[in-house]
Amino acid sequence: RAFNFNAGPAALPLAVLERAQAEFVDFRGNGMSIMEMSHRGGVYEAVHQEAKELLKELFNVPAGYDVLFLQGGASSQFAMIPMNLLQPGKVAAYVDTGSWAKKAIKEAQLIGETAVIASSEAEHYTRMPSLEDIQVPAEAAYVHLTSNETIEGTQFQAFPNTGDVPLIVDMSSDILSRPLDISQFGMIYAGAQKNLGPSGVTVVIAKEELLAASPNTIPTMLRYDIHQKNNSLYNTPPSFSIYMVNQVLHWLKEQGGLQAVQEHNEEKANLIYDAIDSSQGFYRGVAVPENRSRMNVTFRLTSEDLEKSFIKQAEQEGFVGLKGHRSVGGLRASIYNAVPKSSCEALVQFMKQFQQQNS
Ligand code: PLP
């Protein structure tokens, strides 16, 4: 298999792919594939329910929260959040951390009164705003932030205390990469295609009282309360994607749960950051050390020509997805949960070899 450093869709655990392959044509003796089954039947519903329960178990989700499986990607949540949760007279408060935060802000501005309460734009998004700088306005309906900026390679290691105002977090690129106290959040959400499974399903974990607050003036399919009341089966769910999420959650449990996953992720990230830091300026990390992402390692070389040659040579040696996002350039190694440590070791070896050849 390739050394897959894609930012998303991203590497899946080989064991999950193999299990899905074994069950693909005849799902557990039912004479058909899971994707051919009715979503109203017991076999599919058990898979659906188990995925919800596994998410709650792995993430230690407290009582009073529910899990939704939605479509439209995390990008649709950018609009659904203000449509459902921004009451008239209130302000949607956003923390501007980079590319994905900006997209969320843009959608909220279409819906209602929106304020950017902290931003790291002046530092070219090489860091996250400090927690002290995130001041919650009295009239805030919620505070929204992005836990991991996939493109810039920055990550919050702790979250602001927003008091009674719900904290809503886009965790698309770092969900289930570490244990977190879910009670500090009103809602978290993530497109599945990085840490959870294939694209096609978006996971929302939220306080039931928030999910119940949807106005009845917005389209039915965009209402959290409708999806929650119907156990994410109001319409046909992306059943195959949810089955794959179920398999990934089983795999995460087999890895020893989120504490073990976090330790593994830190080891992987440290390998690459150490290679950058010990390169005497040949490689330069984009993010400030205290906000470095453990999921997306962004770095530069001393010239764009050298970066092009790095990517080309890396591709020839079986490394996929190391080109930085087209909006920022540079290099990026996305090392989500399913990327094995051996891939990171191979990358470090390649980085050292490339440095030797080019300095
Ligand atoms: N938010 C973050 C942090 C992301 O990294 C991405 C995708 O890369 C998105 C949102 C958008 O997700 P989707 O493609 O599921 O709409």
Image: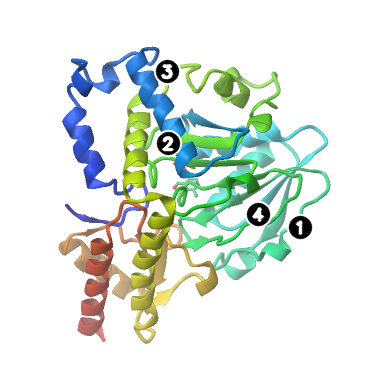
Task: Name which quarter of the figure residue 214 lies in.
Answer: top right
Q: Is residue 26 above or below residue 5?
A: above
**Could you tell me the amino acid type at mark 4?**
Val
Checking the image for residue 135, the label placed there is 1
**Nearer the viewer's eye, disc 4 or disc 1?**
1
Determine whether label 4 and label 2 are within 8 Å by CB.
Answer: no
- Gap between marks 3 and 1 measured at Cα: 41 Å
Tell whether circle 3 marks a residue whose Cβ is less than 8 angstroms from ligand 1.
no
Callout 1: SS: loop
Residue under the point 26% across and 81% down:
355
Q: Give the residue at mark 4.
A: 95
Residue 52, can we see it?
yes
If the image is split into quadrants, where does the C terminus sit?
A: bottom left
Q: Give the residue at mark 3.
A: 236
- Gap between marks 3 and 2 measured at Cα: 21 Å
Say few, some or many: other residues with alpha carbon within 10 Å of mark 2 (under 14 / 14 to 19 / 20 or more).
Answer: some
Checking the image for residue 257, the label placed there is none
Say few, some or many: other residues with alpha carbon within 10 Å of mark 1 (under 14 / 14 to 19 / 20 or more).
Answer: some
Q: Earlier in the sequence, mark 3 or mark 2?
A: 2
- Gap between marks 4 and 2 measured at Cα: 30 Å
